Image (tube, grey):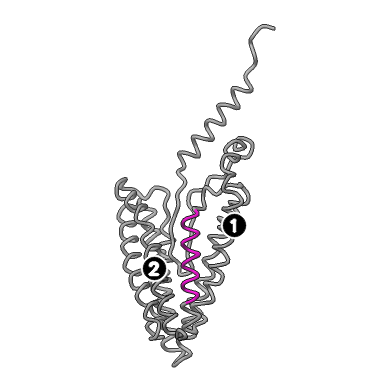
C-alpha cells in the first residue's frame, strides 16, 4: 500500500522537530558559561536576535497557512527559548553590549516585524498574503547562509577544521533534509527551497571536514609562518535560522602571539659563544 503524502510530510516534520529542538538547545552550554562567569565575554547577541526574528516570521507563516502544524510547534518553542537566551544575554552583558543588543532587538524583532505584519495585513489579501510572507521567510533564510560560507573560507584558507565542528554540520544537514522533505510532501516551496541550499552547504562543510580533518597539526606547526587572524566568534545558522556562536578566546590568541614574539627575539639574539 502506497504511503500518502500527508503521512510522509508528518514523518519528515516530526523528525525535523526533534532535530531542530536539539539545535535550539545547543547554546545551553554557552549560556551556562555566561551565567557562571557573569559575563558575555566574546559572545555575540546577533545570532539569537536573528533566530528569534526568524522563528517569529515562520510562526506567523504557519498560522496563516494553517496546515503547517509541525512548523508551528517548533517555531513556538524557538520563540520561547530564544527570548530566554536574549534575556540572559542582556542580564550579564556590559553596558555598551547591552545597549547594542537592545537596539538590535528593537530594530529587528519589534520594528521590522511590525512593519512586515502591517504590510502583509493591509497591503495584500487572501492567498497572496501567505505567499508574500512565505517569500519574506525564504529571503531571510537564504541571506543568513553568508555566515557559514565565511567558515568555509576560513577552513580552506587555514586548512584547519578547528572552527567547524563536524557534529553541528552533520546535524544541520540532517535538519535541512527533514525540512526539505516536509516542504516537498506538503507541496510548499517556501519551506523546501531554502533547505536545498542548506543541504548543499552542509554537504560542502562535511566534505571539507573530510579533506582537512588531519590538517590541524600541520597548521599548528606552520602557524609561526602563517599566523591565523584572530577569530572572536563564528555564527553557524541552520536553514531555519537556529544560531550558535563559537568563541575563540582572545587570551589564547594573545598567548600564541606572545610566544611567537619571544621565539623570534631569541632567534635574533647574537651568539656570544666562542668559536
Residue 267 placement: quadrant:
top right
Instruction: Using a 10 Å C-alpha cutoff, classify the residue at mark 1 as few (fewer than 14 neighbours), some (14 to 19) or many (20 or more).
Output: few
| Residue 35 in the image, given as x and y percentages of width and height | 30, 50
Q: Nearer the viewer, residue 273 or 181?
A: 181
Q: Main secondary structure of the magenta part?
A: helix
According to the picture, the residue beneath numbered tag 1 turns out to be: 207
Q: Are marks 1 and 2 in contact (CB under 8 Å)?
A: no
Q: Position of residue 201 (x, y in %)?
A: 56, 64
Q: Quadrant of the N terminus?
A: bottom left
Q: Which image quarter: residue 240?
A: bottom left
The quarter of the rendered structure image containing the C terminus is: top right
Q: Name the residue at 54% across, 60% down.
A: 148
Q: Residue furthest front?
A: 1
Residue placed furthest toward the bottom: 126
Residue 158 in the image: above or below residue 64: above
Q: Which mark is residue 52?
A: 2
Total label count?
Answer: 2
Check if residue 98 falls in the magenta segment: no
Looking at the picture, how far across and down is residue 176, in whole percent?
49, 69
Q: Which residues are magenta?
A: 166-181
Q: Residue furthest right?
A: 275
Residue 50 got which mark? none
Give whichever of 99, 38 is nearer the camera: 38
Q: What residue appears at the point 38 percent right and 74 percent down from the top-left corner?
A: 14
Amino acid at each position: 500500500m502506497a504511503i500518502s503524502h500527508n503521512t510522509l510530510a508528518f514523518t519528515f516534520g516530526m523528525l525535523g522537530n526533534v532535530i531542530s529542538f536539539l539545535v535550539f538547545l545547543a547554546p545551553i552550554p554557552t549560556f551556562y558559561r555566561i551565567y557562571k562567569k557573569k559575563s558575555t565575554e566574546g559572545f555575540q547577541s546577533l545570532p539569537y536576535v536573528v533566530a528569534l526574528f526568524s522563528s517569529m516570521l515562520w510562526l506567523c507563516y504557519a498560522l496563516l497557512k494553517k496546515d503547517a502544524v509541525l512548523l508551528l510547534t517548533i517555531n513556538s518553542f524557538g520563540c520561547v527559548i530564544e527570548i530566554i537566551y536574549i534575556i540572559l544575554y542582556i542580564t550579564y552583558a556590559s553596558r555598551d553590549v547591552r545597549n547594542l543588543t537592545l537596539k538590535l532587538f528593537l530594530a529587528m524583532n519589534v520594528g521590522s516585524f511590525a512593519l512586515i505584519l502591517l504590510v502583509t495585513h493591509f497591503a495584500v489579501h487572501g492567498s497572496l498574503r501567505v505567499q508574500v510572507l512565505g517569500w519574506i521567510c525564504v529571503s531571510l533564510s537564504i541571506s543568513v547562509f553568508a555566515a557559514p560560507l565565511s567558515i568555509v573560507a576560513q577552513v580552506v584558507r587555514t586548512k584547519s577544521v578547528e572552527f567547524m565542528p563536524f557534529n553541528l554540520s552533520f546535524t544541520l544537514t540532517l535538519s535541512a533534509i527533514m525540512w526539505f522533505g516536509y516542504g516537498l510532501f506538503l507541496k510548499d516551496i517556501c519551506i523546501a527551497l531554502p533547505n536545498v541550499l542548506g543541504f548543499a552547504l552542509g554537504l560542502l562543510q562535511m566534505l571539507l571536514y573530510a579533506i582537512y580533518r588531519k590538517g590541524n597539526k600541520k597548521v599548528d606547526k606552520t602557524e609561526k609562518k602563517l599566523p591565523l587572524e584572530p577569530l572572536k566568534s563564528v555564527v553557524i545558522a541552520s536553514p531555519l535560522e537556529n544560531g550558535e556562536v563559537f568563541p575563540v578566546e582572545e587570551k589564547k590568541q594573545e598567548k600564541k602571539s606572545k610566544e611567537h614574539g619571544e621565539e623570534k627575539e631569541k632567534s635574533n639574539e647574537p651568539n656570544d659563544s666562542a668559536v
